[in-house]
Amino acid sequence: MGELTASNMFESETICADHKDLIHDVAYDFYGERMATCSSDQYVKVWDSDGRGGWRLSASWKAHHGSVWKVTWAHPEFGQVIATCSFDRTAAIWEEVGDAASSGSEKGLHTWLKRSNLVDSRTSVTDVKFGPKHLGLLLVTCSADGIIRIYEAPDVMNLAQWTLQHEIPTKVSISCLSWNPSLSRVGNPPMLAVGSDEPNTSNAVANVPSDKGTACNGKVFIYEYSETSRRWTRTECLSSVQEPVNDIAFAPNLGRSFHLLAVATKDVRIIKLEPLA
Amino acid sequence: MNNLNMDLVLFRGNGREPASNVKTFILPDKCFEKGVGCAWRNGNKFAIYPRSQTPSKTASTDVDNKILNIRQDVLLFTSILRKLVNESNGTYLLLQKAAETAKTTDNQVEFLKLSRQYRSIIRVCIENLQEALSRVQDGVEKNNLLSYITILYSIECIWHLCEILYIDNIPGDIVLPYLLEWVRFHFPCHEQTASHLLEACERGSEDHQDYWITVIGMVVQGRVDVARALMKLHSAAETNEFKLVDNSLRSMPVYSVYGGISTGEFTITWKHWQAECRSKLSSGVLSNEPKLELIMRLITGDFGAFSSIRGDYTSWYDLLGGWVMYTAPWARRHELASASAACAELGDALSNSRLDRAIRALLDGDLYQVIHEIQQMSDNGWFVTHLTDILYHCGKLRILDKHQTDVTNRLRDSLILDYGSLLMEHKSLWTVGLSYLASCPPEGLRRAELILERMPLKTEAKVMRVMAEAKKYGLVDVGVSACVCQCAVQGGVGRLGAGVAWAVRARSGAAAGRAAHAALRRYVRARRLPAEDLLLAAGPALLLHDTLLFLGKYCDFHRLYKDREFKKAAQLLVSLITSKIAPDYFWETLLLDTLPLLESDEPVFSSSDTYEIMLCLELKPAGLDSEKADLLRLALARNLARTVLSEGGENKQTEDGKTT
Amino acid sequence: MPIDVQGTFVSQKINKVRWIPEDYVETKCFFAGSWDDDENSIKVWGFESPHEDEEVEYPRQLSEYPVDGDVTQIKFTEKNKIAVSISNGDVKVLEVSAYDKHTPLREVYHWKKLHNYGENECSCTSLDTLEGDIVSIGEDGNIHILNGRRGDVARSITGADSCSLHSVCFIKHNEIITGNLRGHMKIWDLRSPDNKPTASFLLAGDELASTCIINHPTQPHIILAGSESGSLAVWDLRVNTFPTSLLNAHSAGVTEMQFHPENPNKLLTSSVSGELWDWNMEAMTKSSKGPDGQLAWLSLDDKNTMMVNSLMPKLHKAINTIHCDKGRILCGADNEAIYLIKNLKY
């Protein structure tokens, strides 16, 4: 009898993204059926799965006046909505409208309208993410000057109206962020993790005090929202991460009592966060 | 889902030694050299792309931007193996039910039945594969089928042994007859030759090139009768040497639980018999008949003899039944470790395949090792999941972690969760996967919820089916969310009626409001009310949202107007105006709707109605351009003039009536 | 002989099964349409016994016709021709060879994207046939009357419903009934030029879809509708245009209903809950005449008036389709199996 463990096979297929410059982000929609890409060529492209393993370009447009760093999808309950952020210091919210035939655009391409432009930042907006659905329609951005901004659309029907709810200065350059997707109804307050790409010169970060007053030279910070004080506060600084952070992501919560956070620096770490009882 | 980041390690090349469960890929293109990003899609699918953290200084036009979509190729999703997946799912669910009743009554018989059912499913699958193999021409496809067959043969073999050792109810725990049956079933190597020879029934059968190997094969498989019958066909069968061996074989005591003697007594007779055989052997009468001598040495349990024939067999367990039979036929189930150790050392062919290790571990009673071995098989966890589950329910599994805590149920659950999640990835097999996850609450249900809500919903038939499944397992939120998403999808393609219907189904005020707003905006734009059929029959569903209620009433106003019930239409319109639930963008429409009614022959608005409308017109001037506003003012004034006159008279009369 | 059930796993979820009628011999072959998979198809299967004298018969695949989407309905337009509705919005008429069932199905007519949202895909959810005429419905809320002999669209009612339509049935040659996502039923007179229903009503107050509608083979004025909730409505169009009673039947949606072709007092129903039932209709039609024209909910506990038999142990997955020919019933299910039930008394 032959060996029974043929290593599990993986298949791959290649898509030529056809961006005229470097790609900075690829994001799948909620179902994994659509894919958005963004690039330094200032364009955003949307691709639709054909159900047979292939991808068809369904929209492509110039979204910003600078490199587009990140693209992210809203929950489909809010419609076909994406947010982008850019070196041009803005973040934008886009909605797909109507069917392809009516809009008079290029044949077969869908139209995405800019519903809102968020211009509060004075530096490059480095990441943007929609909040978990159960919190309503929330958006968080972060920028190179270290300010985290949380926006809310009070009326989910009106994507043109966003109010800036919170501005959290971190004093270090922030490169990426991730919402904790855990439901708040089971006792998890809204939580964000942010990663800094500040180069590792010891004096640059040593002076950043956490809210508890202790200095921390880590590169990943956890912020939590307190219902009582109605403020976002830094509750944790992960001192184990000392290298500049490229990307950060919470794992989906499967009913665990703790949270899992993946942090990409020069290597990848999985960090377990256990809420205090 | 949660091992996403483990895999990421690969692409970032951290220089550390990768863990044993990490799979490594070589990225084909140069464009991945600088830095690589990864985006998780769903299930075991993700994309990697060349990613840069910094903007390029010079916009180059020759950037090579390739996105690589990667997915795991799952063996179980092969069409022919899907039968195994579906059929075993039925057995699995029956087993869960049996386990439920086993809590109160002994249910071992039922478990054995289900274990056999699993084995027969495997058997059918092997037969299907063999049939398919006989039809295919393509070399690659042939190889695939062959490798599936190999995998399933091993599964069948291990499962059967496991059933004997852990699930079956063996009288007196004497395992030999079962072990022999197992060897014969899975390694039927000489059976055909034996039956050919017996059928031909010719004296001098030893001329057949496989004669002796067949006779000896029958001896080590414990088929003493067949061996004797074959020996009778030898041309020298009547010689004393043959008669001596035949006699020894014939007189071998066989233990039977129901034979009326104790194992102790049996052991004594058996040892006596073997001593006799040994003395015959040492007398040297057989020295001229080396094959007969070999048979005698085998039945006396001579290690050297077994070792000398090991080369004729592909594996050591071919000889296991014979070894136990001629060394310790009274062995109980848990006393097989030494036999397996002895057999594994036979000959010099060192075999250490996964199947070898699994069978060794099984005979040693080390179930932890068994699970560890079969977990590595490339059947995507089908075997390890189902076997672990049945052993767990039979109460035969106890796995301790390094802190000596019992982690058996956690092990079982984690296997089922992984297997269920894997199946949920498949477009068609998701319902099967769901039934596995649902059998592992609470984490299974939580996982099911996360995967189910991400199920692409291309048709309403699928939406309804997802909702039915969600309802079956109490996943209310999934159902609601699917409706709200469907509402958004229908709104997106301009099907506002369907949008409202889905919002109502979700009982979602927000979604209902959104759909209603979309309908009103369309009316302002195109003067066409969508979904009148729905709105006029909607009833209490309209109460979900103020705007939806407004839309419903406004629809009703149109119906009344069309039916020429002007008085009622006017009443409704006034109440819509005064209730102030109309959205701002709709004010103009609403106010201008009064115009034709104001100018009807019979006055339909009372003076107080007219005052109300006037008030609203003046309070909300922004919505109306001045020309239209003036037109309306004029009409209102005229209406007031004619109504005040007639009403004035009436009022006076009633006042007079009171005073007098 | 007792009822005998044989299952065969076919590696496809089966959404529709149909026996292919034979003139002088027992039916041996059937169509099976699949759904909810990356690749779907309509296959022709034939039963054969591995050994001459054996009772057990196994279906073998004779031909396969790939389809770009879920097969949502299969109905005969002629003896060897079927109309097929597909979730990509297409309707096709396919022909099976009368002589050799191994021959691939031949496409007779193809209405591409008959149902659509402009450029976007929209499911053709069901169809019904009557003497060569086809009526198709879709999630777009449109109704099309197709001529299965000439291959043209005879009539279209666009915007027939603001919601998606899910069930349809010919009442007469010129009259159809449709049911939508909310259980809103409409009766249409095809002779009338305006696109307005002649009657409309709600199947039940629960806002759930009407999943299938059929009429009585010998008394076409008796209509049955199955609901997504698992309940069954029966009414007599001569008395009322709307049902007066609803039966709480299956614990989940009714997927298909069929009157026994030889005995119209026998009704078969299948359900998402994995049940396959055999009803005594005599009792049921009686109860459908509600006392005072009010909608009455009946429960199945009342076993005296209803005779319901379960024909097969409850399956753990949905049964999507049934088709009965004399004493033999085929059913197709979501566990990727086709079952043959033999020795049904009728």
Image: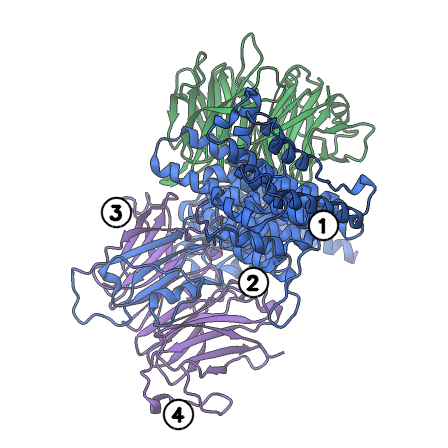
Chain colours: A purple, B blue, C green
Q: CA distance from mark 2 to mark 3?
A: 43 Å
**Which of the labelled discs sits on residue A106, or is there none?**
3
Tag 4: residue type? Asn
Image quadrant where residue B52 sits: bottom left
Looking at the picture, how far across and down is residue A80, in whole percent? 41, 54
Q: CA distance from mark 4 to mark 1?
A: 61 Å
* Residue depicted at 27% across the width and 65% down the height: A64
**Which of the labelled discs sits on residue A207, or is there none?**
4
Dot 4, how many residues are within 10 Å of its Cα: few (below 14), some (14-19), or many (20+)? Answer: few
Tag 2 and tag 4 share a subunit:
yes
Q: Chain of mark 4?
A: A
Tag 3: residue type? Glu
Tag 2: residue type? Leu
* Residue depicted at 76% across the width and 29% down the height: C290
Q: Chain of mark 1?
A: B
Q: CA distance from mark 3 to mark 1?
A: 61 Å
Tag 1: residue type? Ala
- Secondary structure state at the residue bearing disc 4: loop
Q: CA distance from mark 1 to mark 2?
A: 25 Å
Q: Chain of mark 2?
A: A
Callout 4–callout 1 Cβ contact below 8 Å: no
**Of discs 4 and 1, which sits in the foreground?**
1
**Which residue lies under the disc numbered 2?**
A254
**Which residue lies under the disc numbered 1?**
B99
